[in-house]
Image (spheres, rainbow, N blue to C red):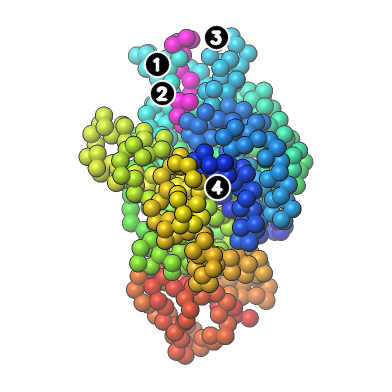
Amino acid sequence: MELSWFKKGTIYQIYPRSFNDSNNDGIGDLRGIIEKLDYLQGLHVDILWLSPIFCSPNDDNGYDISDYCAIMPEFGTMEDFDELLQKTHDRGMRLILDLVANHCSDEHLWFKEAKKSKDNSFRNYFHWRKPAADGGPPNNWKSFFGGSAWEYDSTSGEYYLHLFTKKQPDLNWENPKVREEIYDAMRFWLDKGVDGFRMDVIPLISKRDGYPDAPDVGFRKIIEDVYANGPRLHEYLREMNEKVVSHYDAFSLAEGVGINHNNAGLYINCDRKELNMLYHFDVLECTIVNGKFEEDSPFDLVNLKSIFKRWRDAVHEKGWLANAMGNHDFARMISRFGDDKQYWSASAKMLLIMQSTQNGTLNLYQGDEIGMTNIVLESVGEIKDVQSLNFYNENLETKRYPKELALEMINKEGRDNARTPVQWNDEINGGFSIANPWLKVNPNYLDINVKKQDKDPDSILNFYRGLLKIRKEHDVFVYGDFEEIEFNNPNMYIYNKMLGNDKITVILNFGSSVIYYKSSGEIDKSTILVNNYETLSVENDTMRLQPYQGVVLKMN
């Protein structure tokens, strides 16, 4: 497989609104990111991914775009962006933007014009349909954020499609003018020197002919079979690559909603010339049965191993994956997969060992490098996430859950968990801003913050720095062939990785109990490359692992 800069690199996702506030208005901004570029460089990340910074009324925090070629004023100016891009490149890092091409804002000029009349030239930029026979929506499609995916427009007497909020109308990619509008926006940023795009919900851009009703199955299955993987999707992706991305030293990263391991190759196999990589949702949703705030299941390590294996097998030597265990749409990684209390530090480090030794481009989310955890919101008034608010308000109508339980579910799975401001120090608001932040700061910032961990050699932050540096020096971490050991062990994740003459063994204790690992031969402690504890107890061929201990042995 061709080795490209974006394959070995580490992506660090920045949620600008919550990263760093430079002008003390309570909202993170571009100059705030500029202030932290040395910090990011010192973390040994390679690619900065910015969640949307374009003009937006913020119904969904920037994922509802009103102008694809302008900066949201509360984030700064185009001059600020140009400086950020230049200073990122000066430090040897790259920068990619979040392309939201399935939908725009209802405050975009295109939609404002489309609503004026049925014969307006922008009408066909969107999906309009007449009411059903009973006057209701054209079909039974539900929004990702609750309620119908159709909104009635009294001016024209028709409904428009919005798979997300009603202020996010879906764009009609059947219209070649829409595609060219998106391509022109991409060229605008690529010509500035942007290094690529993370493509938000890109599998949804092609709709099923006739908008058939969704079957009565779980919502995750509806996404896969009805909303995603539409009939012209791959035609559009090939066209996008041919007309835009292939003309630049840039890459495309797909958010893989609705993609499974069986059809992933259609998106990322290199001979298809569509997308460069994707990150799938099987890991992120491994405890979610149908959808958020619905039935969930306990974490199962063997299931997680199976997910990694089937995706590895599906794309082996043909395509490329980004491996992610957290982002702006899910609760905090350590609160979901580790122990954010008694074994907070050890489990955060162990999770990084696992993630950094999986094949593919490592994808980190801001704050994970200091072990930021879920937050407890005390009342509905503290909720900012539109998905969580919609769930709470719908629950008030249906009375499916007691209000207290609904809030508890939001605190467990809601998106605000990942969006709380980054905790830089133990000063007011965690050093994020002097002003009242747009979203509550996690009160544990007094104990969990960058400043406290910066000088502590045993901190999560310094473990991240050291391990990411080691990862850069050992290609076997990224490209090595896998050999699973004790695959069905429910408490340990053990595997060898080989690349040429390089070989490593990864041994992870995925629990809160001491556990013993018996090797096939005598263990030489001098081969320890990574260890998230200060010591490792070894006697001949047996290793005694502390709770959440993770070890990488170099086996040359």
Residue 471 got which mark?
Answer: none
Q: Nearer the viewer, residue 108 or 114?
A: 108
Residue under numbered circle 3: 117
Residue contact at pointers 1 and 4, CB within 8 angstroms? no
Q: Earlier in the sequence, mark 3 or mark 1?
A: 3
Q: Is residue 418 magenta?
A: no
Residue under numbered circle 1: 132
| Mark 2 burial class by Cα count in 10 Å: few <14, some 14-19, many 20+ | some
Q: Nearer the viewer, residue 415 or 318?
A: 415
Q: Earlier in the sequence, mark 1 or mark 2?
A: 1
State the CA–CA distance, disc 3 to disc 1: 20 Å
Residue at the limit of the structure toward the bottom, as seen here:
540
Q: Nearer the viewer, residue 52 or 289?
A: 52
Mark 3: secondary structure: loop
Residue 437 visible in the displayed image: yes
Figure check: 442 above or below 113: below
State the CA–CA distance, disc 2 to disc 4: 43 Å
